[in-house]
């Protein structure tokens, strides 16, 4: 399922190509100053990133001649990088991320308890951001740098101790895999290094 489809997807991609070009020339810090910082934008931005990551989006971009190679009018990598950059400013909202997590609001209304409120657990939105960013840590381009910056901002927030310990365990496991046997792919070797 695509969160954005048709002409809106093409417009989003073109806008992200432009923003990525400005960020390349002027720097990401300059671009971030002009991005919206509304707490309500956190989950839609994460859904957009997920829709850009899906296999359906990759096939559609390749059919349009805009795959990850960046050939054509722009690729998905610009969209991913700009969305990661936007998320890196959105995670700095000055209150707990569990407040804006609609999954927790739905669970509270139904009375379900997943343990997200416990001391060692992170809200689902935080787990989703960490999961998406760890996938991009293996990229060789700007997405890796922006994902690392986003993880740094997210995992150093007060209340993110559970997500931080999960990330450290993931990093340790990845490094142990690399030390024990050669990695299966170059992306796997550089995911943590």
Image (cartoon, rainbow, N blue to C red):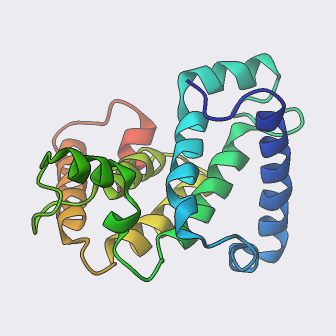
66 left or right of 192? right
Give the quadrant of residue 20: bottom right
Residue 42 % position (x, y)? 52, 60
Q: Residue at x 57, y 35 (%)?
A: 51
The answer to whether residue 156 of the structure is visible from this angle is yes
Query: Along the line of sight, which residue is nearer the eye, 123 or 21?
Result: 123
Identify which residue, 30 or 24, lies in the foreground.
30
The image shows residue 79 at horizontal and vertical percentages of 70, 47
Which quarter of the figure has residue 165?
A: bottom left
- Which quarter of the image is occupied by the N terminus? top right
Rendered location of residue 22, percent (x, y): 84, 66
- In which quadrant will I find the C terminus? bottom left
Left or right placement of residue 173 versus residue 24 in this view: left
Looking at this view, name the residue that lies furthest to the front.
109
Between residues 185 and 35, which one lies in front from this camera angle?
35
Kindly tell me whether residue 145 is visible in this rendering.
no
Residue at screen point 19% across, 57% down = 166
Q: Please report the residue visible at 41 percent of the width from the left and 63 percent of the height from the top.
A: 100
Give the mark count: 0
Residue found farthest to the right: 73
* Residue 123 in picture, x, y percent from top left: 27, 58
Q: Residue at x 79, y 26 (%)?
A: 6
């Amino acid at each position: 399922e695509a969160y954005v489809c048709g002409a809106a997807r093409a417009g989003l991609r073109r806008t992200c190509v432009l923003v990525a070009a400005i960020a390349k020339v002027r720097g990401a810090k300059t671009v971030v100053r002009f991005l919206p910082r509304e707490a309500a934008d956190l989950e839609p931005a994460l859904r957009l990133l997920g829709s850009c990551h899906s296999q359906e989006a990759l096939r559609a971009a390749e059919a349009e001649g805009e795959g990850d190679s960046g050939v054509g009018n722009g690729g998905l990598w610009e969209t991913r990088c700009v969305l990661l950059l936007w998320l890196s400013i959105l995670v700095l909202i000055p209150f707990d991320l569990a407040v804006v997590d609609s999954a927790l609001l739905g669970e509270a209304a139904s009375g379900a308890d997943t343990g997200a409120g416990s001391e060692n657990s992170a809200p689902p939105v935080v787990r989703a951001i960490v999961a998406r960013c760890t996938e991009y840590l293996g990229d060789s381009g700007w997405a890796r740098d922006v994902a690392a910056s986003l993880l740094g901002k997210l995992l150093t927030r007060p209340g993110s101790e559970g997500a931080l310990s999960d990330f450290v365990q993931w990093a340790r496991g990845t490094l142990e895999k690399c030390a024990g046997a050669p990695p299966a792919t170059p992306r796997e070797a550089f995911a943590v290094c």
